[in-house]
């Protein structure tokens, strides 16, 4: 490995931050909020759907993560530590005024059915819809609604992997599940969203 | 999807996220590459799934105001043990 790269591994900044927090240095609080505030607020909003709930998740997460830091064995793992606290806060919170979708997502329902007479299915290719169109107006609302309609166990994997940008191993560790289960849930969640957009765009 | 391929459409479906994430072993990847070239429904399915993932990834983050940041840092400071 390139020695310069070895000096600056991802997590080194987090390690220093965790050590400063554990040492009780008051100047570490602003960088802690700066580093994780925007991440956990977005995570909470994506999981709960409401800004007010997301702010509650954020406050609870930063406080609990900070107060329990003495139990963190590897200070370089601060990020997964904070997400684990946030995931627990989200999983126990009920969405405001909404019933939580439950259950499992069946693969069979997400794959195309055979066409007439058992021939190949007709699948519309709307992949050329501009990304900007998918990120505003009705389509944006449709996508957000589809994400919030996923059962929580699936939604949380999708949010951690595709929105928070965490890898399979970190996601599995945060949720206390196997890497394989994290992959299965991510795949089904993505297929469910594809189907929701397909119903709208094709 | 019913035509004969070295990998069936249905068998392939289980691997598509790993395929899109570049986490599939080379042999399986080559089978999917070959299959999608010959199977327009699968090609459309893979392309629209990829577009879906791109849209999910591109959703913007929630803005966090300086006032809220300050209030969070203040709460932590108050909770600090002597």
Image (spheres, helix red, strand yellow):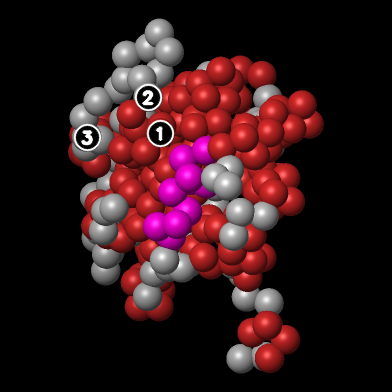
Q: For the residue carrying disc 3, how many other residues have a C-alpha within 10 Å: few (<14), some (14-19), or many (20+)?
A: few
First reached walking from the N terminus: tag 1 or tag 3: 1
Please give the residue where the numbered disc 2 appears in the rendered image. Answer: A93
Query: Which stretch is magenta?
Result: A63-72
Find residue A148 and report its horizontal and vertical position in percent. Answer: 43, 25
Q: Please, which chain is the residue tagged with disc 2 on?
A: A
Q: Secondary structure at mark 2?
A: loop
Q: Are marks 1 and 2 on the same chain?
A: yes
Name the magenta segment's main secondary structure. helix
For residue A147, which quarter of the picture? top left
Secondary element type, mark 3: loop
Identify the residue at horizontal 68%, vertical 25% (top origin).
Answer: A136
Q: Which residue is mark 3?
A: A104
Q: Which mark is residue A132?
A: none
- Which residue is located at x 74 percent, y 32 percent? B70
Q: Residues within 10 Å of mark 1 (few under 14, many from 20)?
A: some
In space, the residues marked 1 and 2 are separated at their CA atoms by 6 Å
Mark seen at residue A89: 1
Residue A5 point in image, percent of width and height: 68, 83
Does the magenta run of residues contain A97?
A: no
- Distance between mark 3 and mark 2 Cα atoms: 19 Å
Closer-to-camera residue (A40/A67): A67
Q: Quadrant of residue A107?
A: top left
Is residue A52 toward the left or the right of residue B64 in the image?
A: left
């Amino acid at each position: 490995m390139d020695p310069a790269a070895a000096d600056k591994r991802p997590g080194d900044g987090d390690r220093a931050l965790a050590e400063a927090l554990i040492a009780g240095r008051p100047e570490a609080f602003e960088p802690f909020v700066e580093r994780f505030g925007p991440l956990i607020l977005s995570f909470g909003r994506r999981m709960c759907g409401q800004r007010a709930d997301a702010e509650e998740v954020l406050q609870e997460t930063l406080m609990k993560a900070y107060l329990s830091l003495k139990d963190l064995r590897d200070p370089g793992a601060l990020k997964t530590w904070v997400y684990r606290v946030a995931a627990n806060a989200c999983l126990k919170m009920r969405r405001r005024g909404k019933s939580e979708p439950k259950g499992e997502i069946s693969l069979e329902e997400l794959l195309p059915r055979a066409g007439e007479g058992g021939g190949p299915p007709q699948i519309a290719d709307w992949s050329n819809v501009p990304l900007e169109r998918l990120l505003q107006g009705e389509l944006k609302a449709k996508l957000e609604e589809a994400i919030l309609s996923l059962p929580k166990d699936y939604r949380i994997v999708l949010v951690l992997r595709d929105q928070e940008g965490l890898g399979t191993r970190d996601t599995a560790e945060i949720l206390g599940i196997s890497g394989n289960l994290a992959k299965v849930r991510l795949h089904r969640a993505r297929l469910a969203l594809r189907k929701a957009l397909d119903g709208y765009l094709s | 999807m019913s035509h004969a391929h070295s990998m069936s459409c249905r068998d392939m479906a289980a691997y598509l996220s790993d395929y899109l994430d570049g986490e599939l072993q080379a042999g399986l990847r080559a089978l999917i590459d070959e299959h999608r070239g010959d199977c327009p429904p699968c090609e459309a399915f893979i392309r629209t799934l990829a577009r879906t993932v791109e849209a999910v990834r591109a959703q913007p983050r929630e803005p966090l105001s300086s006032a809220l940041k300050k209030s969070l840092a203040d709460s932590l400071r108050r909770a600090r043990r002597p």
